[in-house]
């Protein structure tokens, strides 16, 4: 299952591309919270004002840090526009802000470049490909 939040829609489009590649459903925490938590979770958030969205962190907290679950984490930001140092900063800062409350097994993580006005087709393609990779790791569609 893919669980994410979004403010302006780029994270939603990225989550939907991951879901398409993975063959699973996506839950936007701004609209609905999943009733049951699966064993494999893809967790995503954009970064606003140097922080992940609070509802994503709250989802982790309310579900005992996703203890016993297998998790892949992604963030959406523009840090890579600043080159390798920006990307490294995003890895150390943003991903760790999301992962620090997770008690489950984080098996993969990604940083996707967001956009302000025009959708970035390269990012969508990368998200879909990551979904395919995750599907291969976990044997296809999750149930």
Image (cartoon, rainbow, N blue to C red):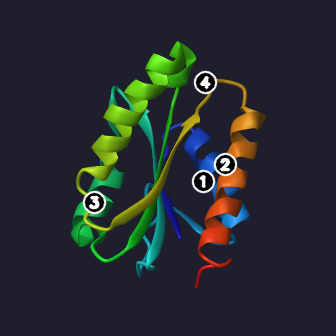
Do we see residue 31 in this rendering?
A: no
Q: Is residue 118 above or below residue 73?
A: above
Q: Mark 1 points at which residue?
A: 15
Task: Tell me if label 4 and label 1 are in contact, CB under 8 Å.
Answer: no
Task: Specify which label sits upstream in the sequence, 4 or 2.
Answer: 4
- Within 10 Å of the Cα at label 4, are there few (<14), some (14-19), or many (20+) other Cα atoms? few
Task: Specify which label sits upstream in the sequence, 3 or 1.
Answer: 1
Q: Which residue occupies 61% across, 64% down?
A: 134
Do we see residue 108 in this rendering?
A: yes
Q: Is residue 66 above or below residue 37?
A: above
Q: Which residue occupies 46% across, 66% down?
A: 32
Q: Nearer the viewer, residue 105 or 2?
A: 105
Q: Name the residue under label 3.
A: 102
Q: Quadrant of the C terminus?
A: bottom right
Q: Mark 4 points at which residue?
A: 116
Q: Distance between the residues labelled 3 and 1?
A: 19 Å
């Amino acid at each position: 299952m893919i669980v994410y939040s979004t403010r302006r829609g780029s994270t939603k489009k990225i989550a939907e591309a991951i879901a398409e590649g993975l063959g699973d459903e996506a839950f936007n925490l701004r609209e609905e919270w999943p009733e049951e938590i699966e064993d494999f979770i893809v967790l995503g958030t954009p970064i606003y004002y140097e922080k992940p969205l609070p509802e994503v962190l709250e989802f982790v907290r309310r579900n005992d840090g996703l203890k016993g679950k297998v998790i892949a984490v992604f963030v959406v930001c523009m840090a890579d526009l600043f080159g390798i140092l920006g990307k490294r900063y995003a890895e150390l800062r943003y991903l760790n802000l999301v992962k620090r409350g997770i008690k489950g097994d984080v098996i993969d993580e990604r940083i996707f470049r967001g956009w302000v006005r025009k959708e970035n087709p390269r990012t969508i393609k990368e998200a879909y490909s990551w979904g395919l990779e995750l599907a291969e790791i976990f044997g296809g569609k999750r149930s």
